[in-house]
Image (tube, rainbow, N blue to C red):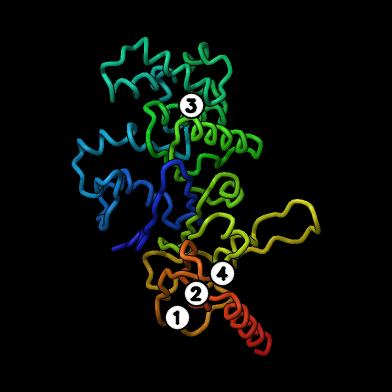
Amino acid sequence: MVRAVRGVSFDLQAGQTLGIVGESGSGKSVTAMTILGLARGARVRGRVLFQDRDLVGASPQVLRWIRGAQIAMIFQDPLSSLHPYYRVGWQIVEMIRTHDRSISKKQARRRAADLLTLVGIPQAARRIDDYPHQFSGGMRQRVMIAMAMALDPKVLIADEPTTALDVTVQAQVIDVMRNVQSEFGTSIIMITHDLGVIADIADDVLVMYSGEVMETAPRRELYYHVHHPYTEGLLASLPSHGGTRERLTPIPGSPPSLLAEGAPCPFAPRCRYAFDPCFTDRPELAEVFADERHRSACWLSHDEAGRRREREQIDAAQVAS
């Protein structure tokens, strides 16, 4: 049996943005799908509490009521999420009227045009009758955001919404999501492998690797006071802007297969600072740097001075060998 995600736990406050980051295959999308009950065929254990209701094991009727109306999702590829045979306005209208039949088609169409205007699509009243293939990639993503916000959901899950978009369009999509959050007070879960995107939008960050949480902290704390070597490796692989140009520092090796039995710490085989406990015992996700909001699953010392000393000792031992 493959355990795709293990021990993931987080809180999402109203109006806040949680960034979930990690390499491909780290379990980010599976986590999002499980929240909405879309991980069909999977054996799910644990709880997903939304407004005091546990979504794990909820009936199909309850989940249908929650999806879209209370928790909406933007998928990675808008072209495969939008039906190619129907106009985008019709699809948004159907989304609205599926959940609320008291709204007339005319009212729903007006709402759809307003949403397309809100997400920055020019001449929305005309373009509402265009087909998905008549929009660019960035515009299709805006249509998906408009559709997701059609019923003013409390939570918006964005699964890599800026993948395959150029940097300028990425920034525009992020601005649209910020505006939507400001307008409706929506909570956002932003799933991505791009720490640059996380830096632009997240309040808190959760770093995943091989189906587990490696580190979680407020955004600024994570970027400037990192603890886990995996998070440090992700940050080191980012290109810097300005200053001295240096080569990017990749993380050596590849993520482990979930089918194979590996070290108790899944990152240990790729970790520069791995030592004996990493290969014998699984580290708990515990408070580090005396900050209850900052937790890391690593055997390195949880205080800054001790961590620095241990890393220096490991580096010296590697040089000596």
Residue sitting at 64 percent across and 59 percent down? 237
| Mark pair 4, 3: CA separation | 38 Å
Who comes first in sequence, dot 2 or dot 4? 4
Mark positioned earlier in the residue sequence (1 or 3): 3
Question: Which residue is located at x 55 percent, y 73 percent?
Answer: 271
Label 2 – label 4 distance at C-alpha: 10 Å
Q: Which residue is mark 3?
A: 143
Please give the residue where the numbered disc 1 appears in the rendered image.
279
> Where does the image place residue 208, in percent across and percent down from the top left?
46, 59
Three-letter amino acid code at the position of disc 3: Val
SS state under label 2? helix
**Is the C-beta separation of discs 2 and 4 under 8 Å?**
no
Q: Which residue is mark 4?
A: 229
Tell me, yes or no, whether the two marked residues, 4 and 3, touch with CB atoms within 8 Å.
Answer: no
Mark found first going from the N terminus, 4 or 3: 3
Instruction: Report crowding for label 4: few under 14, some 14 to 19, many 20 or more residues within 10 A (C-alpha).
Output: many
Q: Which structural element holds mark 3?
A: helix
Q: CA distance from mark 4 to mark 1?
A: 15 Å
- Distance from disc 2 to disc 1, alpha carbons, whole Å, reads 7 Å
**What residue is rendered at 78% in x and 52% in y?**
242
* 136 with respect to 60 (left or right): right
